[in-house]
Image: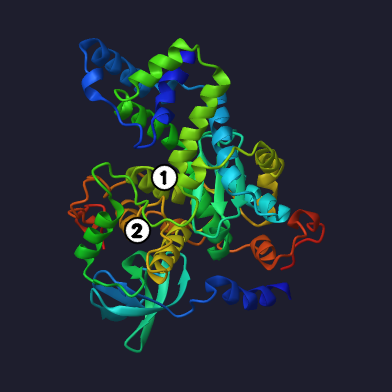
Amino acid sequence: MNKILLSLMLASGCMSSACALDLGKLLTTENINKAADFAKNAADAAKDISPEAEVAIGDEAAAKLLGAKPLVNNPALQRYVNQVGVWVASQSEKPNLPWRFAVIEDPTVNSFATPGGNILITKGLWDRLSSEAELAAVLGHEITHVVKQHHLRAMKSEASRKALGNLADLAVSAKGGGDKRQLIGNLGKGASEIAVRGLDKGDEYDADVYGMVLTARAGYNPYAMVTVLQMLERFNSNSGGLEVFNTHSDPRARQDVIEASVGDKLEPYAGGVEQTSRFTAIKRGNTKPAAVTPKKPVKR
Amino acid sequence: MKIPFMAALLPALLTGAALAESGSVIRNTELRQKPFSDAAVVATVSSGTQVEILSRQGAWMNVSSNGQAGWVKMLSVRVGNGSSADAGSVIGQGVKVATTGSSGKTVTTGVKGLSEEELSHSQPDYGELERMKGFSTTPADAGKQANLARLTAVQVPEIAVSGSSGSSGNGSQNPSSNPQMRR
């Protein structure tokens, strides 16, 4: 376990460019062989990491994100996004992760996922969503990152790329014994940085396409994903590109990939639910939870 | 009685400020009378034509162009006052914009929101994490609430991603050359 954590720690050890390395000093045969070993360990790390460690890393990352941007102080809204999020996540291959969803106090339009199942969307994004199907699509996108362990893989590849540069750091921490809590802390920091910086475009496309599948499975119109992307596109062009949807690829490119991959394959599900009364109630600021009123059978 | 009220409220919630939404068609497309593939064709619009977006339904979009209204596939339209309406170059631009350097990582410049720098100055807030956990729910409860919202789970097979290979961003990716595309 410790070995895995150690090799994964490479991901967070040297994020800043200030961490320049003296290649000349490090390029001995012995070190190169060591580096190759570490890169190999790192490549296996995401696969081998236990579900518990994944959750611990994810919680650390979420705490870090929440330290920068707190929860929106609206319990009804927070409970509501969990109702929708857990329902969508239940359609994935990992329904039993400790899924948690939240809206954070940030005016820009963005969303984040950490390993283990923490998903945060900004207030700016929530304010611009116009239906529950759109919310489901956004959450489905982020759920995909978690289910397919995109962040863990990003940490892993970061580790491989930086293996040489981290040899010195690693030698020090290996000698020091390395306290597990500290390792988790560092890994969480690495994961939150990746969440903010963004993933590879390929992972984003994957999350769009599989997110649409999850949205359809949950009974919504999956093309709400396209509506969200078009909202982002409009938003980008209106704001002069200042507040870009920074951790996600260009909306046009994403629509092109959706068109090539999904096209009309999900049209049989396009008649799915678009809007719900619970969404409009939360948007209206009616904080009475929908769960309290089901006594009266829904009319018509 | 509830329903008409909600319906009346919806448009206000929907687009907020930007009600007049416009876009351009990215390929020669038929404008149909109804949002169905076999509905009657009202007109043909050529690639690059500017359209006004009236509404959306399912996978379709109700648009008007040159005084004629009709339905096109949502994915045949890109919104905004498209600088370049030519489909090929739009795709090229998209890839270019989205790529920085050779890593294929997404753009991070000009960000005003939660940034890496901001993050590096923040302390983990475990109290807030606990509050967040307090709002979570179980799959069983979420399922019950979903059913009350008239949602039912549907079997949908997974779909492979295509048209996204080549993160080098040379703009040669053209989805319409994909054999799966039939439009």
A282 with respect to A38 (left or right) = right
* Mark 2 Cα shell of 10 Å, populated few (<14), some (14-19), many (≥20): many
- In the displayed image of the protein, which residue is found farthest to the bottom? B67
Q: Tell me what residue is drawn at x 68 percent, y 62 percent.
A: A282
At label 2, which amino acid type do we have? Gln
Q: Which mark is residue A241?
A: none
Q: Position of residue A83 (x, y in %)?
A: 65, 49
Q: Are marks 2 and 1 on the same chain?
A: yes
A263 with respect to A283 (left or right) = left
Quadrant location, the C terminus of chain A: bottom right
Circle 2 or circle 1, nearest the eye? 1
Q: Which chain's residue wears label 1?
A: A
Identify the secondary structure beneath mark 2: helix
Q: Tell me what residue is drawn at x 70 percent, y 54 percent.
A: A73
In this rendered view, identify the residue nearer to me: A170 or B18: A170
Q: Tell me what residue is drawn at x 21 percent, y 12 percent.
A: A29
Mark earlier in primary sequence (2, 1): 1
In this rendered view, identify the residue nearer to me: A33 or A229: A33
Q: Tell me what residue is drawn at x 66 percent, y 73 percent.
A: B6
Q: Quadrant of residue A158?
A: top left
Look at the image and tell me whether residue B45 can be seen: yes
In this rendered view, identify the residue nearer to me: B76 or B16: B16
Vertical relation: A29 (above or below) A281:
above
In this rendered view, identify the residue nearer to me: B27 or A76: A76
Residue to which mark 1 is pinned: A197
Look at the image and tell me whether residue A214 can be seen: no
Q: Position of residue B137 (x, y in %)?
A: 69, 42
Q: Quadrant of residue A40?
A: top left
At label 1, which amino acid type do we have? Arg
Residue to which mark 2 is pinned: A255
* Mark 1 Cα shell of 10 Å, populated few (<14), some (14-19), many (≥20): many
